[in-house]
Amino acid sequence: MATDEQKSTWRTKVGFAEQLKGGVIMDVVTPEHAVIAQEAGAAAVMALERVPADIRRDGGVARMSDPKLIKGIMAAVTIPVMAKARIGHFVEAQILEALGVDFVDESEVLTPADECFHIDKHKFKVPFVCGCRDLGEALRRIGEGAAMIRTKGEAGSGNVVEAVRHMRTVLAGVRKIVSLPEEELMTEAKNLGAPYELVVELHRTGKLPVPNFSAGGIATPADAALMRQLGAEAVFVGSGIFKSGDPKRRAKAIVAATTYFDKPDILAEISEDLGEPMVGIDIKTLSEQELLATRGW
Amino acid sequence: MQGDFERHIQRMVELGAEAFPARLPADIDDADGLIIPGGESTTIGKLITQYGVDDAILRAHQAGKPIYGTCAGMIVLAKEISVGSEEKGGQRKLGLLDIRVARNAFGRQVDSFETMIDIPAITGNDGPPIHAVFIRAPIVESAGPAVNVLGRHAGNIVCVRQGTILGSSFHPELTTDDRVHRYFLSMIAER
């Protein structure tokens, strides 16, 4: 019998990210939240101790969640469960892999553990997602082994402006590379700080080699649809759901908005009567030290 | 709706077919055949009930249009889900494929794998095996008398056909092997 299996290949990692396209990945802090997310139609959940808005409020060092909490959430739902490790903290990632989480987010929302180096993600069986603000950062993370990219936005802000900026910046970078003559690709790779091979591949295929999702500041169905129309292939919603007045309804509406992102009549219908959204923050009122998106190198 | 629809569309276009994403009943009414992709079966199951896509799929089936479900898509087509449908209210099942499936039967993502599978109905008796990618994949635990088992992996049923319905636990759209899609196109052409 032919049972020659190759586990945890690059194809299975990116292939899994492909399955999440068109979906919503929701931050949850309890098994009860996870069940609400699943009922609402989330494609996956992100298991956390605190949503980014609370991390921002509480200050201090934000770390990987307690394994007991993550296991409780994994036991509560059948959809995939993701969890966050600090930038560069490969031991937190090893622990998350040992727990059997489906995706590790090497995330700027947590306090970085290494101010020079990210995790060598090729070494792991579990796939990784990483944040980015521009194309260079996206290609560096992919070069390190990220099987999915998400634009960072500004997590826990309830303000979509940074998510828009980062998505537009990444896609402008892609369009530029596609338009360049081949002899200019090396210098462009140098300017971006990106691996040359990935720049060449992008030039050839016209798109990033892994799915490109959006995160950070999505609070309404319209925000989710905006990011999808701008080119995000799926969305992460953090504080926006469980910091709102009626999480169940809002979660369901954001799922529908992510699917019907280009149908304004449906968006109008599902945006109705959702209760209070989370209170947002004007990014300009945040000091440089309070910005999460600037973490990562 | 939600899931890996782009890769299927890309493959179908490469094979010279006209393909488009279907999210509303009218899209399905316009098509000659339907692929329900991999993704999250709970998510797809909920979205199809929202605007009547479930009824449109049943209509398409009654009209004799071939339907192919990969991974989550096969789960949505199944008559019975034995494991992993504990969520409240259950999961929307179309019940068109007389099989019982176990979700995530090979384990979590770290257990996802790729392998080669013999499917003579698709490759012919002499053709090389199909390159198959399994991602948090389901297993067909049992199949009714009208179901043809086309392929197995390690003894488990992973590819089935019942009349105009094709189902696979694995993702042919993630490989460069286009024979499963060609086979499905031939099912549409036979109509």
Image (tube, coloured by chain):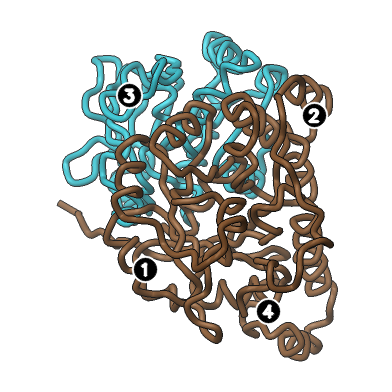
Chain colours: A brown, B cyan
Query: Label 3: chain?
Result: B
Q: Secondary structure at mark 4?
A: helix
Give the residue number, with chain letter if any, for mark 3: B86
Query: Label 4: chain?
Result: A
**Could you tell which of marks 4 and 1 lies nearer the N-terminus?**
1
Same chain for marks 1 and 2?
A: yes
Closer to us: mark 1 or mark 2?
1
Q: Amino acid at mark 1?
A: Glu
Residue A259: quadrant of the picture: top right
Which mark is drawn over residue B191? none
Query: Label 1: chain?
Result: A
Closer to us: mark 1 or mark 3?
1
The quadrant of the image that shows the C terminus of chain A is bottom right
Q: Amino acid at mark 2?
A: Lys
Closer to us: mark 3 or mark 4?
3
Q: Position of residue B2 (x, y in %)?
A: 58, 36
Query: Label 2: chain?
Result: A
Give the residue number, with chain letter if any, for mark 2: A263
Q: Is residue A255 above or below residue A126?
A: above
Closer to us: mark 4 or mark 2?
2
Which mark is drawn over residue A200? 4
Closer to us: mark 3 or mark 2?
3
Give the residue number, with chain letter if any, for mark 1: A92
Instruction: Confirm or deny contact between disc 1 and disc 2 (CB under 8 A).
Output: no
Q: Residue at (43%, 18%) from the top-left corner?
A: B93
Give whichever of A130, A88 is nearer the camera: A88
- Residue B30 visible? The answer is yes
